[in-house]
Amino acid sequence: MASSVTVNIAPTVTFTASPASVTSGGASMLTWSSTNATACTASGAWSGVEPTSGTQSTGALTVPSSYSLVCSGPGGASNTATVVVGVIPLATLTAYPTVVPSGGSSTLTWSSTNATSCAASGGWSGSQATSGTHITGALASTTSYSLTCTGSGGTSNVSTATVTIANGTVNVSPGTAAITLWQTQQFTPTVPGGGAVTWTVDGVAGGNGSVGTISAGGAYTPGTAVGTHSVVATSVANTSESGGAVVAVTNLAGVYTYHDDLARDGANTQEFSLTTENVNTSTFGKLFSCTNPDGAIYAQPLWVANVTINGAQHDVVVVATAHDSLFAFDADANPCTTLWQVSLIDTNHGGLGGETTVPSGTTGFLVGKGLGDITPEVGVTGTPVIDPSTNTIYVVSKSVNAAQTTFYQRLHAINLATGTEKTGSPVTIAGTFPGNATGTGTIIFSPQQENQRSGLVLVNGTVYIAWAAHEDVQPYYGWVMSYTYNGTAFTQTGVLNVTPDASGGGIWMDGGAMAADSNNNLYLLSGNGAFDATSASPPNLDYGDSMLQLSPALNILQYFTPTDQLTDDENDGDFGSGGAAVLADLPAGSPYTHLVMGGGKDGNLYVLNRDLLGGLGDGAAVQMLPQGHGIFATGAYWNGNYYIASGGGPLNAYLLNTAQAQFSLGSTSTAVFGWPGGTPSISAAGAQAGIVWILNTNQYCTNQSKGCGPAVLFAYDATNLANALWNSSLVSTDAAGNAVKFNVPTVANGKVYVGTRGNNTGGAYGSTSISGELDVYGITPTN
């Protein structure tokens, strides 16, 4: 019997796939060879007897596939080799919705499970993450976008999404709408020749719980998904006729405080209606004005969504005036609708009868020295703060009795829904602090001398208030006080005087509010005043021209004082003419993870380490950014950029390198913002569609000003300040009321709110027909 022969063909039979992995839907090239096999049989994606060597392209692959090859040698021996061809899943790029009206924008989403990077082309450029969302610009024609994702194996795949434009033969009005989650929006179709329509939301007939639903009559109700949604109406009689609108749904609950939040970064990142494409003179402008405010609006307007007033729901704008009044306006109603208005110094709000605001012009003034810094009266000048958990507005009024001999400052707790004073409110502000500036050992708070210019702060249920001077008239001090309100009464919880042995050190910060970090520590900048914090001799320490970190109990934890402090003090160079902004935490590995920024009249913007402010001397700063002009602003921070306009300079954007914790100058505006410059606000959809809003108020109509004229609202592309999108001086009907210095625009739910002094030119209260005016800007109704 012949013996069997075993042939080991493993070393001589090779079976390889090149490439070893392919994109889903792609084909792989399989190769094999054997030097001693008599036959090879393949299985898997193909079958049949194969030669001892060969090449074969597989079919399109949608899942990882295994292929095996059995090669038989002499004597019947065999060996099997197997290879698995891996599949790179497609980087999916979808347009959501796939149909938008002309001028609308689409949301593109993409993801890849194993791509190392994706690069987009079409409507945007630059490297993209392996997954993400991008809002396209306004579309006027069908547009295609492609995304190429490269995997770890070096292979790539291209996905393409096409966004189709509705043909527009059905007109849908309004073409663009901005609403909050609680609101509904009525859309009205106009069909050529008449007839009914069917509706889709983001391509879904009738919509759904995510994108929102729309009734047969065109009433849209938001779903759970915020952002932009496409509403398309199609003629029943002729399905080739359709048209659409864009509805932007925001989950912004409110702008409750100065510069949007406790960090004072000035960024509303929940704005989905306003984009760099639709803010232009064709589609954006003044919608309406509220002309019944009874005084100049020095405080920033505040905005709250979904407030029930007289049994109806409203988005509300709260406006405080220098005539000691408070107004609540419907944020969306055109023409302007007043929901309530109150005087904070009448007998229903703590007044004793016959009280008035405090005259402060160039004649008959009871504060200051006749410079008319705040003209023509002082009432509410500091921006209020709103507690959304209790619907309470906290605001400080200032008044004088009829005989003009006794002055009052009061902290009010106002019911947001009614304007009425809450139980136990107001409280008359008073305080003392140990100090030798007057030689008595005690400093007593003066409601006449102290100017409550900075915005109020609410941290963890406690209201913080700061004061400075009226036109530097002595004696004055930098005071900070804190109060809590329990629903029935106010309790004073803290008092601090930052210059108790020397006076000065006012806290005004261009009207800005103290910033706060996640540990509830406060940050303020003080103005002209003595500094002796390095000395152990005085019973108290004086912190003129310094940035202070305060504990919630108003203990001074740290300070930073610039090298030129004495020069600042001697030459009216307030370090505290600008405000502080707390930056978002930098990533681990950065040399500093907690930064705060601020600067003043000497024109230096300081980047400081919140963990170690450093004491006296510029060497303690992380970085100094000279502006060339004095700073009278609180900068805004968004997407790694810090924006600020000094008094007499352009609007600058500084880009933060997080690895080094260093800023470099990025883009700059062409326009120059005359003194005092401006505090910018940011609107954006997350990290996209950023717009910088800023007011030019250099013609602010007081004795200090170079003239009197309208406030001018500017809009800039936040990614490139050289791209000026729009300003309110380009079209005559967009002009705002006369300017008030240091004002800040408020952006919410597709609108921008600007406070002014109406047509008052700096004269006495009531000398003109409009003493105060709120101007409201947005997408014009025809768009």
Image (tube, rainbow, N blue to C red):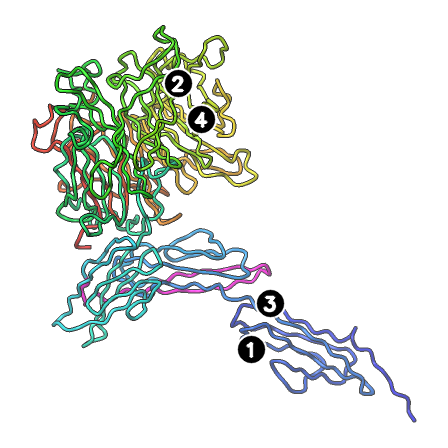
In the rendered structure, find residue 59 and report the number of the disc placed on it: 1
Magenta segment, which residues? 144-172
Residue 205: quadrant of the picture: bottom left
Residue 21 shows in this picture: yes
Task: Categorize mark 4 by other alpha carbons within 10 Å: few (<14), some (14-19), many (20+).
Answer: many
Residue 21 is tagged as: 3
Instruction: Give whichever of discs 2 and 1 has the lower sequence position.
Output: 1
Closer to the observer: label 4 or label 3? 4
- Magenta-highlighted stretch: main secondary structure? strand
SS type, badge 3: strand
Q: Residue at x 39, y 32 (%)?
A: 515
In front: label 2 or label 1: 2
Badge 4 is on which residue?
549
Q: Earlier in the sequence, mark 3 or mark 2?
A: 3
Q: Is residue 774 left or right of residue 66?
A: left
Dot 4 or dot 3: first in sequence order is 3
Say which amino acid is labelled 1: Gly
What residue sits 53% from the left and 73% below the top? Answer: 62
Instruction: Give residue 539's position: percent from left, percent from top.
Output: 45, 10
Secondary element under disc 1, as helix, strand or loop, is loop
